[in-house]
Amino acid sequence: MIEPPIPSRSPLAQLVFLISGGAEITKVSETPVAGNGLPYCYVEVTGSTGTQYVVYAYEKEAAKLHEMAINIMNKKENAFDIDY
């Protein structure tokens, strides 16, 4: 079962929270733009207990979430260095 995102946190803060708690990214949307032209990104994350989460963002935050998730997956040293 996929859990809803963590309420009252920005998508970037949700992702940082989950990853810092030992979760791993299992899927990132291929592009931060939806078919209707509205910028959109989702990231599937699996926690250490097997619980799955989906973090999603729209508009300006979509590109930032996509960039951060790709950087984390590629184990870039500065993966969390994105303004949010």
Image: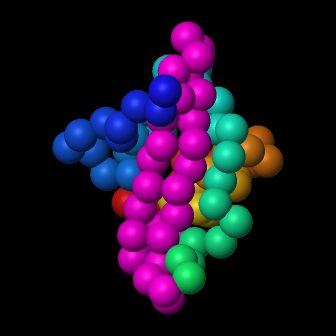
Residue 6's quadrant in the figure?
top left
Name the one closer to the observer, 57 or 36.
36
Name the one closer to the observer, 19 or 47.
47
- Residue 55 at what x, y percent from top left? 45, 47
Would residue 77 be seen by someone viewing this image from the given angle?
no
Quadrant location, the C terminus: bottom left
In magenta stretch: residue 11: no
In magenta stretch: residue 44: yes
78 on left or right of 5: right
73 on left or right of 65: right
Residue at far right of view: 74
- Residue 11 at what x, y percent from top left? 39, 51
Point out the stretch of residues depicted in magenta.
Answer: 36-64
Residue at 68% x, 46% y is 27
Residue at 50% x, 88% y is 37
> In the figure, 13 relative to 71: above or below?
above
Name the one closer to the observer, 73 or 54.
54
- Residue 81 at what x, y percent from top left? 54, 54
Residue at 40% x, 76% y is 59
- Residue 50 at what x, y percent from top left? 58, 17
